[in-house]
Amino acid sequence: GENVEQHPSTLSVQEGDSAVIKCTYSDSASNYFPWYKQELGKRPQLIIDIRSNVGEKKDQRIAVTLNKTAKHFSLHITETQPEDSAVYFCAALSGNTPLVFGKGTRLSVIA
Amino acid sequence: EAQVTQNPRYLITVTGKKLTVTCSQNMNHEYMSWYRQDPGLGLRQIYYSMNVEVTDKGDVPEGYKVSRKEKRNFPLILESPSPNQTSLYFCASSRGPGRAEAFFGQGTRLTVV
């Protein structure tokens, strides 16, 4: 089955700097790659996703890139703000099985 | 309002006492899943269901049971809870393949003493 590796596990950045979180996946048939944000004490919520026929997608300060050949995808957050502090999970979907998640990255934005 | 509802939100129980965590969704989703979240281990899938009466084991199914008798409900059953099942549990639902955003419940924090 699918296996998703996520790095780093923790990340601290100064407010206004950029943050990058990287994930790799194992199943070349995976075709959907979402990112979830989990604020402290809350449920994970989808922030952006990308499908395998697209190389990059952007939504305001958030962007995701996908390299199918290398089987990795990344989340980029620019101009970070304190409210970006959270745990971020990447995930991959292959076939009919539900999402497989990475272990998460705890992002701290220091004001 | 579209939502996934879990109950209870918090539960403290003793080893061996059977318990059920309920999960209900009002979005007519086919897929439902249970995850447990532990520090450093992320979200690990316990069981999932692709439709009524169809359930499959995830990565960590030992000690858990599920049922899917109707589309909206997907309860998680711990027949004989043990302390290593102390965790934060999330139920999630999504539409079929290709429309895969997962909507999570509020979470259930379970402590087994």
Image (cartoon, coloured by chain):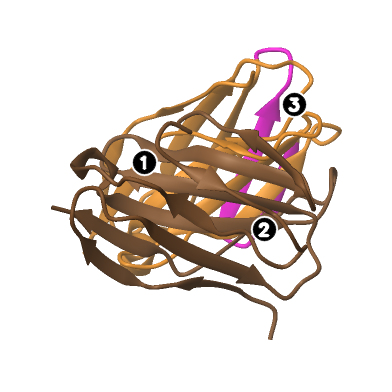
Report the span colored magenta.
Answer: A56-70
Say yes or no: labels 2 and 3 on the same chain.
Answer: no
User: Which of the marked residues, 1 or 3, is nearer the chain's N terminus?
Assistant: 3
Question: Circle 1: is it few (<14), some (14-19), or many (20+) Cα within 10 Å?
Answer: many
Q: Residue pushed farthest bottom?
A: B1
Amino acid carrying label 3: it is Ser
Give the residue displayed 28% in from the left and 36% down from the top. B40
Chain appearing in orange on the rendered image: A
Disc 3 target residue: A30
Chain appearing in brown on the rendered image: B
Amino acid carrying label 2: it is Ser
Secondary structure state at the residue bearing disc 1: strand
Q: Nearer the viewer, mark 1 or mark 3?
A: 3
Amino acid carrying label 1: it is Thr
Residue A76 in the image: above or below residue B92: above
Q: Position of residue A49 (x, y in %)?
A: 69, 48
Does A23 sit left or right of A1 as displayed? left
Which dot marks residue B9? none
Quarter that holds the C terminus of chain A: bottom left
Q: Residue pushed farthest left?
A: B113
Secondary structure state at the residue bearing disc 2: strand
